[in-house]
Image: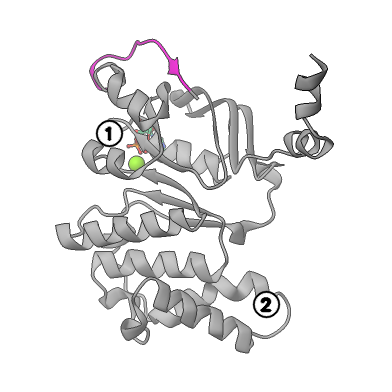
Amino acid sequence: MPDIITLFTIEQIVQNREHVSAVELNDVTFGYGDTVAVEGVSLSVEEGEFLGILGPNGSGKTTLLHLMIGLKQPNRGVVRLFGQRAAEFEDGERVGYVAQRATDRGDAMPISVRETVLMGRFPHAGHSRIGGEDRAAVERALDRVGITDLADRPIDRLSGGQRQRTFIARALAAEADLLALDEPTVGVDVDSRTAFYDLLDELNAEGMTIVLIEHDVDILTTHVDTVACLNRRLYHHGDTASFLESDAIEEAYGRRSGVLDHHV
Ligand code: ADP
Ligand code: MG
């Protein structure tokens, strides 16, 4: 017995107490007026995790992602981002967000790829001017996602895949710890999509926490560690293998009632 106790060093105890998830939702409900879009969702995303969110159209995926990164406040329940209440979260640059349909936004944007990525440095520069260090961070980010040759192009003259890379580069320049992506490859050709997911895998392998909405089950389950299957409520949350073995897809896509299967 005493041997077991000595296995836990003071350091481990302190580490456990200080454990902070990247995102933590506790019994979160959100409605648009009378329409309940997300109901009673509890889950956490650990630092370094790659979580995929799956569900039919209108199942609350975008709403859930907005709740996770503090863009919407729950009607009930609590969301924490890196241990802080999301409503009070102040390190916005730690979260890189790529919105749904960012690929086909038709509006003219007379701003270059490099300027867009530089915007990621604004929170770091604070009240001082953008300096050499910021510019170097921008060049590194452009290089990292492979768009250095596009740096001077206006962002309204990019393909969908190139534009998504620009937003990722902006998040990297901002030194984001968490990437939140909402169906990033809709309208992107197959080769670019494959390259884009390879990039996400690389970033995740380097420690980036990623939350991804992707409606293609095969693509999603190929890349993520964990799956949250949603249809207003959470039908399944667990590692990819447990998701593939479950009936969550049939339940979430087929009928609205089902049993929550929580493995993590
Ligand atoms: P998904 O991303 O899974 O398609 P959403 O989170 O966009 O789902 O939407 C969830 C539900 O909330 C849907 O029924 C949708 O019609 C509704 N909804 C989404 N945005 C709004 C809004 N701004 N006002 C009213 N209802 C909304
Ligand atoms: Mg959506």
Prevailing secondary structure class for the magenta stretch in the rendered image: loop
Question: In the displayed structure, would residue 23 be above or below residue 138?
Answer: above
Q: Residue at x 68, y 49 (%)?
A: 89
State the residue lying farthest toward the left.
190
Q: In the figure, residue 250 lies in which quadrant?
A: top left
Q: Residue at x 25, y 22 (%)?
A: 253
Q: Which mark is residue 57?
A: 1
Q: Residue 63 at what x, y percent from top left? A: 44, 38
Mark 1 secondary-structure assignment: loop
Q: Amino acid at mark 2?
A: Ala
State the residue lying farthest toward the front.
3
Of 118 and 179, nearer the camera is 179
Asked if the magenta segment contains residue 260, the reply would be yes
Asked if the magenta segment contains residue 141, the reply would be no
Using residue 140 as the reference point, say whether residue 125 is left or right of it: right
Q: Amino acid at mark 1?
A: Asn
Number of numbered discs: 2
Residue occupied by mark 2: 125
Question: In the displayed structure, would residue 176 be above or below residue 144?
Answer: above
Question: Which is more foreground, mark 2 or mark 1?
Answer: 2
Q: In the figure, residue 176 lies in which quadrant?
A: bottom right
Q: Residue 19 at what x, y percent from top left? A: 70, 38
Mark 2 secondary-structure assignment: helix
Q: Residue at x 26, y 54 (%)?
A: 185
Local packing at callout 2 (Cα closer than 10 Å; few below 14, some 14-19, many 20+) is: few
Question: In the displayed structure, would residue 220 be above or below residue 110?
Answer: above
Q: Residue at x 43, y 23 (%)?
A: 234
* Residue segment shown in magenta: 253-263
Q: Residue 196 at what x, y percent from top left? A: 29, 60
Mark 2 or mark 1: whose residue is earlier in sequence: 1
Quick check: can you spot residue 111? Answer: no
